């Protein structure tokens, strides 16, 4: 019988794998404890952390926030966690990620093992080559900062179905709130936290499912996505479906980054220009069949038996086919007549 998920997270093997995955991370273990000091007695620190979680005494350390410049001149706020919190989040990720992979849609490419930007772009080009030239080029407005905590926690509860583990994840969600709305709703998950990408894909999975149920081809990379259609009218209808699905998640499309457009090199997705719809080669619906040359025959078949030549004509040989001259075959001598039987 399998262990409960909470016990799997705290298992020595899981914690050991998580610690090895963070071998190059130089964050402080906790306030006032650099990694170098912690490593002098690493086992004691890790076992102490494990006991705090197991007996309900664990509390995440306050987040350290800093901003970096974005390409459009605005600032993006990132979050730095201490090493002890990263270790636990990594252990949770190792346990939950395989289960999540069985759930996620195959056209979602961000923050997933064995998937990357190049695969998302190849899928995009493939659909454009198939004749789906009209696109909904869209972006979710302030996604990481605007995920509502209430629906996100319910989403985690339905997926995890393990109360102690759910309570642990809820602590990290509460600690990472970016802001509180006028109605008192806490929103936002920290960019830079190990578990945030998994939470992102879990929360947007119903959006992917809504598009798939309406048979709308798409490629999604985190909060950026494309919808593919044959006509402009179909693209406009697909945009309405996407808006409604996101509204059900208490999210909105970015008004300046969402448009219906025909594929063209001026349209970029994930930093790459898209093919020109006028020159994109559609994929053939059926591979052309090649006619076999007259002399070809299937392997293993027996050659047709040649009929004997009529009297007076020589059987053609390879010498005849190759054009070499050969002396004429002498005529067959006349056969002697058989005497009649006399009575």
Image (tube, rainbow, N blue to C red):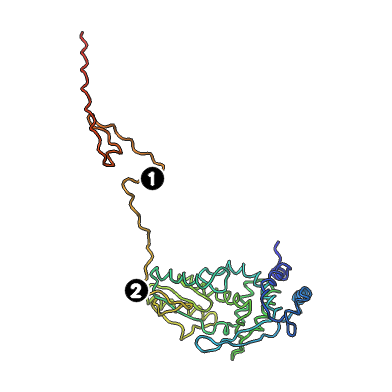
89 sits left or right of 48 in the view: left
Q: Where, by quadrant of the figure, is residue 162 drawn?
A: bottom right
Between 218 and 306, the residue placed more toward the observer is 306
Q: Is residue 181 above or below residue 317?
A: below
Between 2 and 74, the residue placed more toward the observer is 74
Q: CA distance from mark 2 to mark 1?
A: 42 Å
Give the residue pinned by disc 1. Answer: 298
Quarter of the C terminus within the rendering: top left
Q: Residues within 10 Å of mark 1 (few under 14, many from 20)?
A: few
- Element carrying mark 1: loop
Q: Position of residue 288 (x, y in %)?
A: 35, 57
318 sits left or right of 166 in the view: left
- Element carrying mark 2: loop
Q: Position of residue 316 (x, y in %)?
A: 27, 36
Q: Which mark is residue 107?
A: none
Whichever of callouts 2 and 1 sits on the residue coming sooner in the sequence is 2
- Tags 2 and 1 in contact by the CB under 8 Å rule? no
| Total marks placed | 2
Give the residue pinned by disc 2. Answer: 278
Q: Position of residue 34 (x, y in %)?
A: 73, 82
Q: Residue at x 31, y 46 (%)?
A: 294
């Amino acid at each position: 019988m399998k262990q409960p998920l909470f016990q799997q997270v705290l298992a020595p093997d899981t914690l050991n794998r998580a610690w090895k995955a963070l071998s190059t991370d130089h964050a402080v273990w906790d306030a006032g404890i650099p990694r170098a000091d912690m490593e002098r007695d690493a086992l004691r620190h890790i076992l102490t952390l494990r006991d705090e979680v197991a007996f309900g005494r664990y509390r995440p350390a306050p987040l350290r926030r800093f901003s970096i410049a974005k390409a459009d001149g605005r600032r993006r706020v990132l979050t730095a966690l201490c090493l002890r919190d990263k270790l636990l989040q990594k252990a949770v990720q190792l346990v939950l990620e395989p289960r999540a992979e069985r759930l996620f849609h195959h056209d979602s490419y961000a923050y997933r093992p064995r998937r990357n930007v190049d695969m998302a772009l190849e899928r995009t080009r493939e659909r454009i080559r198939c004749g789906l030239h009209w696109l909904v080029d869209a972006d979710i407005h302030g996604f990481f900062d605007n995920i509502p905590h209430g629906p996100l926690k319910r989403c985690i509860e339905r997926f995890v179905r393990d109360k102690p583990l759910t309570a642990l994840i809820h602590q990290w969600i509460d600690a990472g709130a970016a802001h509180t709305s006028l109605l008192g709703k806490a929103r936002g998950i920290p960019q830079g936290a190990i578990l945030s990408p998994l939470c992102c894909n879990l929360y947007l999975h119903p959006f992917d499912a809504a598009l798939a149920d309406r048979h709308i081809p798409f490629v999604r990379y985190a909060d950026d996505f494309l919808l593919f259609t044959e006509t402009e009218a179909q693209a406009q209808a697909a945009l309405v479906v996407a808006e409604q699905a996101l509204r059900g998640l208490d999210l909105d499309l970015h008004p300046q980054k969402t448009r219906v457009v025909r594929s063209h090199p001026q349209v970029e997705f994930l930093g790459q220009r898209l093919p020109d719809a006028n020159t994109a080669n559609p994929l053939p619906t059926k591979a052309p069949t090649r006619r076999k040359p007259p002399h070809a025959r299937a392997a293993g078949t027996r050659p047709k038996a040649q009929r004997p030549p009529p009297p007076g004509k020589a059987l053609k040989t390879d010498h005849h086919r190759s054009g070499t001259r050969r002396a004429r075959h002498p005529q067959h001598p006349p056969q002697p007549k058989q005497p009649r039987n006399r009575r």
